[in-house]
Amino acid sequence: MARKHAVHLILIALLLTACERSSLSVDVVGPRDIPGSDCSNELSATENTSPAGQEASGDVDGDGSDDKVTIALDPAGDRGCKSFLVVTARDGDAIYSTAVDPSGVPRSLPAPSLSSLVELNGDPGLEAIVNVEAGASTQFVAAFTLTDRGLEQIAVEGKGPGPFAETGQDLFAFGGSVGHIEGVDCGDNGLVHLVAAIPVGDSAETYRVDHRFFRPDGTKLVLDSSLNATERLSASDLATVPGFSTSPFGSCD
């Protein structure tokens, strides 16, 4: 009877320890257990294919220690299954991945690349910003976050209609030319700030500048339409607008 009581005490202690650990970071599941995408080559690509030549380090899973973040490529993969975001945590003890661009839409960039690791949604762990597409003068990034379901792309709700409608729904545009400029950055109170400028009339001396603000909600960014704003600025003042003067999400923590 004493032995059974001791076993029960040990089991309770183990359960308490597990609960304490799970409260410190996101309880995540990686592709070794559940694939992050529907790509049949995800496991082999992330294990056997060389990274795209880029690597970043930061706490993505929220446990207080740095993780390694890379892009793995598989040129022989099906459309939408040629590139994968890979997070290697705890010295290789856990690996999480997902397809970078599962839409399979033809892109101008030869391959995605890492842009940065930033804090976007207030949850434990950093988000990964990935360069996905580039036009003649405008570039586009996607944001990924780690949840208890694995790596997920952050969705954006409420971008259109308006000057942001042409950007892919879950992509963020930055850069441009005298005819159209876009940017994205972190705003006050944890908001994400999208901004676009279009010249007024035939000259490029005065611009109409539209601002949209999005509130993080788990794996989504949701428009707060009460904060929509429009102003007119001279071309020389555009550099003072958040999002135009930095890289995408450049001032995020």
Image (spheres, helix red, strand yellow):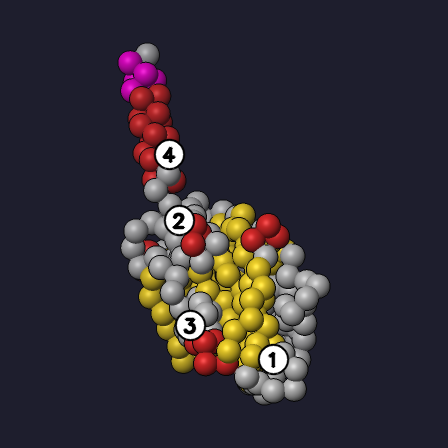
Above or below, comparing residue 208 to residue 229 in the picture: below
- Image location (x, y in percent) of residue 100: 55, 68
Q: Which residue is mark 2?
A: 124
- Density class for disc 3 (Cα within 10 Å; few <14, some 14-19, many ≥20) is few
Pointer 3 with pointer 4, Cβ within 8 A = no
Q: Which residue is mark 3?
A: 240
Q: Quadrant of the N terminus?
A: top left
- Image location (x, y in percent) of residue 251: 38, 65
Marks 2 and 1, how far apart at CA = 40 Å
**Quick one: 105 or 91, which is closer to the camera?**
105
Q: Which residue is mark 4?
A: 19
Is residue 156 among the parts visible in the rendering? yes
Which residue is pictured at 57% across the width and 60% down the height?
A: 229
Q: Secondary structure at mark 2?
A: loop
Q: Which residue is mark 1?
A: 199
- Image location (x, y in percent) of residue 169: 65, 64
Which residue is pictured at 33% across the width and 35% down the height?
A: 20
Q: Nearer the viewer, mark 3 or mark 4?
A: 3
Which residue is pictured at 56% across the width and 71% down the height?
A: 232
- The disc, 3 or 1, on the residue closer to the chain's N-terminal end is 1
Which residue type does callout 3 highlight?
Thr
Q: Secondary structure at mark 4?
A: helix
